[in-house]
């Protein structure tokens, strides 16, 4: 699914999922073999295989929901 990454006014990383009309703050980031896994405030886990460093925001990327 396509998601948009941006920073909120407090400087925290936020994920917006348009198809679900969902906007949640990232509470945890893990580096895994395939890329990164973001854990959102609502409990969702999103796997993001390719993410450039340094992170340029806002940007739209492809993510896969794990949980």
Image (spheres, rainbow, N blue to C red):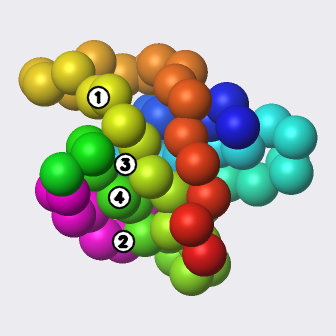
Which badge, 1 or 2, comes first in the chain's sequence? 2
Mark 4 element type: strand
Q: Residue at x 48, y 34 (%)?
A: 5
Residue 39 location, quadrant: bottom left
Compared with 10, 16 (above or below) is: above
What numbered label is drawn on residue 13? 3
Mark-to-mark CA distance, 4 and 3: 13 Å
Main SS of the magenta segment? strand
- Verify CB contact (< 8 Å) between mark 4 and mark 3: no
Mark-to-mark CA distance, 3 and 2: 8 Å
x then y, percent, for residue 7: 39, 39
x then y, percent, for residue 28: 30, 70
Residue nearest the observer in this picture, 48 or 57: 48
Residue under label 4, please give it. Answer: 37
x then y, percent, for residue 36: 28, 50
Residue under label 1, please give it. Answer: 51
């Amino acid at each position: 699914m396509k998601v948009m990454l941006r920073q909120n006014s407090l400087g925290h990383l936020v994920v917006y999922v348009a198809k679900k009309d969902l906007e949640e703050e990232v509470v945890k980031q893990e580096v895994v073999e395939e890329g990164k896994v973001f854990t959102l405030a609502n409990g969702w886990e999103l796997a993001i295989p390719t993410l450039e460093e340094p992170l340029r925001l806002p940007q739209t990327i492809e993510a896969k929901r794990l949980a």
